[in-house]
Image: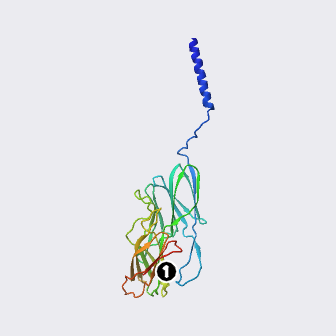
Amino acid sequence: MNLLKLSLASLSLLTLFSCSKNETTPQTKPNPIKETELHQVKFTVQGFSQTYRPFETKASTKTQTNKSNPIDNIFYVLLDNQNLPIDTFSSKIVDSKSKLDLNLQNGEYTLRAIGYKDQGNVSKGYIKYNDANLGFSSIAFNNIESTEIGDTFILEKKFQVSRDTAFAGLTLKRLNAKLEINIMDKIPASANHIEIATYGVSAAYSFYNDNSPSRITSTNSSLLSTVSTIYSLRGQSNQTISTNILPPDQEWFNFKEVFTPVKINVYDFNGKVILTRDILDVKIKPNTITRLSGNLFENLTKDKSSSFAITVDGNYAKNIITQKF
């Protein structure tokens, strides 16, 4: 009996000691963050104004400048850690800035943004885990499919979420190239509109497919046309016609030079072709101006294989790729 009482007393002391130790020992590891906890992530994208000099005549020395906003909207696409699109957001640019606030779980993400000018021909496509793109639609101009590509800028930002975070001062870079046709000779009275066709594309992808998650534009081997009226330029020489191009076969993190044929058709008021010119292997690149310069209308019956002069501008405002024709 005494042995049983002694055992019970010992057990009570052991239990009391054990409880006292647990109550006085400090916790050494913090509680783990729950997977369902959301963190606020803020983005500020800025820097949308540009200065340009109008092209008047070759001998012009005017320093007149104008400021404009080349884009007014941004299409954001959020990718998960497998680089699959999981959500999209649209934002207008106010005071040359765009702000985006997200609430995200812990993890790795990529934010891709496409800035564009809303010209009324822009469409956005999105299928979760499968597709995300921004495209420029065409219109019929005198039975010609004409696709006007607006200024297009992009941004890619990879980031990891574990707490509230803010990213400020993010800047987009220009995706589109510009092709300029500098017509040195006099534009005849019969010329009404001009068609410029290249291997440019009409869509930019935030997610292309599983096999090419980094691709932003597709490859292309068919001509895409833009039509411009030139009847107001009749009788004038040294005039420049320009069109934006989305260069094919580009990646989000790697812009490269590509070569395209340039086909020029000039039409009269009735839509009849009065001149055709083909220029092969013209170099284009994102954020670059390519200028073709030469006599377009000289001797309309002459062999059309003569070459243009080409100039390439790598800074979109200073250096130019030039080529004569």
Across and down, in percent, residue 13 comes to 61, 22
Q: Which residue is more in the foreground, 322 or 236?
A: 322
Please state if 78 lies on the left or on the right of 224 as rendered: right
Q: Residue at x 55, y 67 (%)?
A: 72
**Residue 309 seen in render:** yes
Please state if 297 lies on the left or on the right of 25 as rendered: left
Q: Is residue 321 above or below residue 299?
A: above
Dot 1, how many residues are within 10 Å of its Cα: few (below 14), some (14-19), or many (20+)? Answer: many
Residue carrying label 1: 240
Q: Residue furthest top?
A: 1
Tag 1: residue type?
A: Thr
Q: Secondary structure at mark 1?
A: strand
Count of labels in the image: 1
* Residue 269 sits in quarter: bottom left
Q: Is residue 132 above or below residue 11?
A: below
Q: Which residue is more in the foreground, 317 or 53?
A: 317
**Residue 145 seen in render:** no
Across and down, in percent, residue 240 comes to 49, 80
Q: Which residue is more in the foreground, 23 or 320?
A: 320
Look at the image and tell me in which quarter the C terminus lies: bottom left
Across and down, in percent, residue 35 comes to 52, 45
Q: Residue furthest right?
A: 24
Q: Residue at x 59, y 75 (%)?
A: 66
Which color scheme is applied?
rainbow
Look at the image and tell me in which quarter the N terminus lies: top right
Across and down, in percent, residue 103 comes to 56, 52
